[in-house]
Amino acid sequence: MAYQTAIITGGSRGIGKETAVQLFKMGLNVVIYSRDQLEIETTVAEIKEIGNQTEVLIMRIKYLVEYFNV
């Protein structure tokens, strides 16, 4: 699944968070959206423990759509 990207909404806790972690473990690029920046930072820290190729990009959902051209 190289070069595939999953966009997870509500990815800072619960099912969304676990989905993001599992997809990252499978080798996907994961973009996590949440309204709570602190929770996102916690999730990113946990993912960084799995693999350090993690990048954090914080933007409004409107710009996220434009960024990925979807």
Image: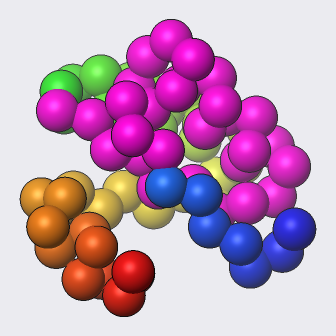
Res 23 quadrant in image: top right
Residue shown at 50% from the left, 12% from the top:
14
> Residue 36's spot in the image, x, y percent?
18, 27
Does the magenta run of residues contain 34?
yes
- Residue at 64% from the left image edge and 53% from the top image edge: 52
The N terminus: image quadrant: bottom right
Give residue 11's quadrant in the image: top left
Q: Quadrant of the C terminus?
A: bottom left
| In-front residue for pair 44/19 | 19
Q: Is residue 5 left or right of residue 34?
A: right
31 up-or-down from 70: above or below? above
* Image position, residue 24 (x, y; %): 71, 47
- Say whether residue 52 is magenta: no
Left or right, 32 with reference to 25: left
14 versus 27 height, above or below: above
- What residue span does the magenta drawing correspond to? 8-35
Q: Judge left or right: residue 30 versus residue 9.
A: right
Q: Which residue occupies 76% across, 34% down?
A: 22
**Place of residue 33 in the rendered image (x, y in percent of width and height, measured from the top left):** 33, 44
Looking at this view, name the residue that lies furthest to the bottom.
69
Q: Position of residue 46 (x, y in %)?
A: 56, 28
